[in-house]
């Protein structure tokens, strides 16, 4: 069975290690050769939380986020570049792009969608929760 790779992106204020128990839910034989990665976002001031410093993939100006909300486009694109670098590392070890999946929760889910849609190659899939 070919190796597969799941990159899991956490939500605002969370961490990669805190999300690692998720992989214990995937016990079927199809996941036997799956490598999981749970990176943590860097700590940054977050505008919607009154500038509090916390793990954040990019700044969020207000909650709820609407179509008219200010956007941190540069921050999102920088985060997308970081995710693309993680995907590129996995491709470099020989993982088939069809076996690479990016998943995320909340802010990590938004980053997942942007990263998968902007990646120059077709991946196995993306799931934003």
Image: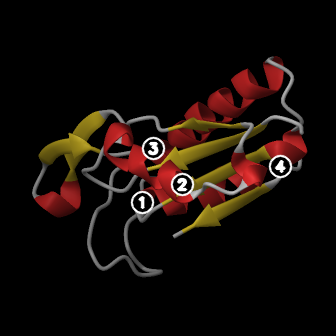
| Residue 12 figure quarter | bottom left
Q: How many residues crowd mark 2 within 10 Å: few (<14), some (14–19), many (20+)?
A: many
Q: Position of residue 2 (x, y in %)?
A: 88, 37
Could you tell me if residue 71 is visible in this image? no
Are the residues tagged 4 and 3 within 8 Å (C-beta)? Answer: no
Q: How many residues crowd mark 1 within 10 Å: few (<14), some (14–19), many (20+)?
A: many
Q: CA distance from mark 2 to mark 3?
A: 11 Å
Mark 3 secondary-structure assignment? helix
Sequence order check: which comes first, mark 4 or mark 1?
1
Q: Residue at x 86, y 40 (%)?
A: 97
Labels 1, 3: front one:
1
Q: Position of residue 22 (x, y in %)?
A: 46, 54
Along the viewing direction, whichever of 111 and 2 lies nearer the viewer: 2
Residue beneath disc 3: 75
Are the residues tagged 1 and 2 within 8 Å (C-beta)? Answer: yes
Residue beneath disc 1: 107
Residue beneath disc 2: 111
Left or right position of 107 against 110: left
Left or right position of 31 against 105: right
Q: Residue at x 70, y 33 (%)?
A: 87
Sequence order check: which comes first, mark 1 or mark 3?
3
Labels 2, 3: front one:
2
Residue beneath disc 4: 123
Labels 2, 4: front one:
4
Labels 4, 3: front one:
4
Q: From the viewer's perspective, is residue 3 above or below residue 45?
A: above
Q: Residue at x 89, y 35 (%)?
A: 96
Residue 60, disc: none
**Quadrant (top left, top right, bottom left, bottom right) of the N terminus:** top right
| Residue 44 figure quarter | top left
């Amino acid at each position: 069975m070919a190796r597969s790779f799941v990159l899991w992106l956490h939500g605002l204020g969370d961490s990669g290690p805190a999300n690692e128990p998720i992989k214990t839910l995937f016990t079927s034989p199809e996941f036997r050769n799956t490598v999981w990665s749970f990176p943590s976002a860097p700590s940054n001031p977050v505008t919607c939380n009154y500038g509090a410093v916390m793990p954040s993939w990019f700044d969020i100006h207000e909650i709820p986020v609407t179509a008219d909300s200010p956007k941190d486009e540069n921050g999102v694109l920088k985060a997308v570049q970081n995710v693309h670098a993680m995907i590129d590392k996995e491709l470099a070890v020989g993982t088939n792009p069809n076996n690479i999946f990016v998943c995320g929760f909340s802010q990590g889910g938004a980053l997942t969608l942007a990263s998968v849609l902007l990646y120059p190659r077709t991946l196995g899939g993306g799931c934003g929760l």
